Image (cartoon, helix red, strand yellow):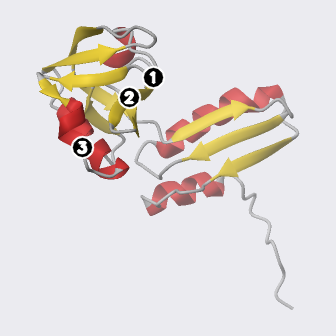
Amino acid sequence: HMQGKLGGIGTYLRISDGKAYIYKPIKSSPAVQAGLRQDDEIVGVDGVAIAPLIAGLDVNQSAVKVAARLRGPAGTTVRLELRRAPDTKTFEVTLTRADIVVPSVDSQMLDSGLAYLRIGEFKANTTTEFDAAMRDLMPRQPKGMILDLRNNPGGFLQNAQDVLGRFYDGVALYEDK
């Protein structure tokens, strides 16, 4: 996980009202290639019904249970039973798990002209992702920048130093008098 990749289908989950949903498929993942969409309900995984599996569990425990069924070694398959609203019928998709690069940096240019960068955790690939995001955002000449570190649990100290060092030009911020 801290190396920035996991074996799985490449999606974030959302648990709501005792059900599991695709929340956000990760770019270029097996989930995206199979056409899975945000808000597709995961009814079953490899023949195991999800609702009874997570009944009575809190959101975090439920997410762990479902994720454990979706993850696995790259090259292995997993069969999903899904429901896509407004249709009430389910359909099945078989995906081949892959090594998923889990992004730690999310970036976008806001309508206000501000560059927004969110770092979810300082992983092995964070500095590279941060630099790529900056190369994308800076040519757009942002008026300012928001560096969102909310709910970031930390991670690799060297990567945190590398990223934060991008904002330091070597000039002392204060003088000792």
Locate residue 120, reporting x and y percent: 51, 48
Occupied quadrant, residue 92: top left
The residue to which callout 2 is attached is 21
- Crowding at dot 2, Cα within 10 Å, few <14 / some 14-19 / many 20+, comes out as many
The residue to which callout 1 is attached is 39
Q: Earlier in the sequence, mark 2 or mark 1?
A: 2
Q: Amino acid at mark 1?
A: Asp
Q: Earlier in the sequence, mark 2 or mark 3?
A: 2
Locate residue 160, reporting x and y percent: 53, 58
**Which label is found at residue 55?**
3
Q: Amino acid at mark 2?
A: Tyr
- Crowding at dot 1, Cα within 10 Å, few <14 / some 14-19 / many 20+, comes out as some
- Crowding at dot 3, Cα within 10 Å, few <14 / some 14-19 / many 20+, comes out as few
Would residue 121 be found to the left or right of residue 68 on screen? right
Q: What residue do we see at 44% from left, 16% from top?
A: 37
Q: Is residue 26 visible?
A: yes
